[in-house]
Image (cartoon, rainbow, N blue to C red):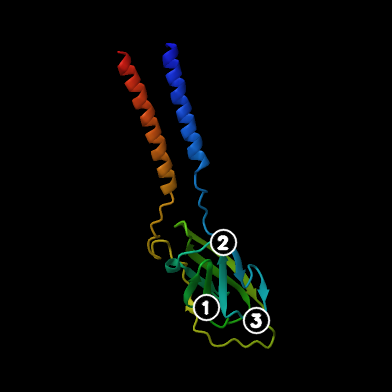
Amino acid sequence: MTMDQLRRLGCLAGLVAAAAAWALAVAPPASAHAHLTAMQPAIDATVSSPPAAVVLTFDEAVHTSFAVVTVTGPDGRRCDVGTPTVVDGTVTQGVSPLPGSGSYTVAYRVVSADGHPVSAQERFTFAPPADYRPAVATAQPATAVASPAAAGPAPAVSRHAGHLSQVAVVVLVLTAAMIMLIRNRTKRT
């Protein structure tokens, strides 16, 4: 290799390194799924008065169309009523009068802002006073939280648009460098 060829190769390597450094420096932050930050009644808490609703708070907004929340009593019957309401990162599910003491399971499935479904189960315990008389509830048999397919498709969210534009810039820089090298080589011959 001649010195001129080594210089061109070094220039090309420098361009590649600069383009890679730029792509890493301006990369958008990684998208994370929504995480449950709080629940009312609190997770694993024991409450003595029946809640009128279960409120789930997430660390980011969730899509309004895809939220599913079920509240299941110790007897396996559902105690949730109606559909959940979603405001930003807060999901509220109405609850019928709880039939009695015991552990209640709150199962949820939401679609986070990045388009990924997030689901889990949490619990709280209802320990009413001795004089508590449960109202006659219209509880439903327990069913599983809807699967992602049953809740409908997740909205199309392009999380990779930033990366694609960076790759395009790197490809353009490399193409320009290759064209320059080829032109210099053809001029000498």
* Closest to the observer, 176 or 71: 176
Q: Considering the image in quadrants, where does the N terminus appear?
A: top left
* Tag of residue 94: 1
Q: Residues within 10 Å of mark 3 (few under 14, many from 20)?
A: few
Q: Which mark is residue 59?
A: 2
Residue 79: in sight, yes or no? no
Judged from the image, the secondary structure of the residue bearing numbered disc 3 is loop
Please state which amino acid type lies under the numbered disc 1.
Gly
Q: Seen in the image, is 36 located left or right of residue 166? A: right
- Residue most extreme to the right: 130
N-terminal of the two: label 3 or label 1? Answer: 3
Badge 1 marks a residue whose secondary structure is: strand
Residue 180 x, y percent position in the rendering = 36, 25
Q: Position of residue 153 (x, y in %)?
A: 38, 61
**Circle 2: element type:** loop
How many marks overall? 3
Q: Tell me which amino acid carries mark 3.
A: Ser
Depth check, mark 3 against mark 1: the one in front is 1
Q: Position of residue 138 (x, y in %)?
A: 49, 84
Image depth: mark 2 or mark 3 in front: 2
The residue labelled by disc 3 is: 49
Identify which residue is drawn at 49% across, 32% down: 18
Disc on the earlier residue, 2 or 3: 3
Work out whether mark 2 precedes mark 1 in sequence or the reverse, and give the earlier one: 2
**Three-letter amino acid code of the residue under disc 2:** Asp
Residue 66: tell me if it is visible.
Answer: yes
Image quadrant occupied by the C terminus? top left
**Disc 2 versus disc 1: distance between alpha carbons?**
21 Å
Question: Could you tell me which residue is drawn at 63 percent across and 79 percent down?
Answer: 101
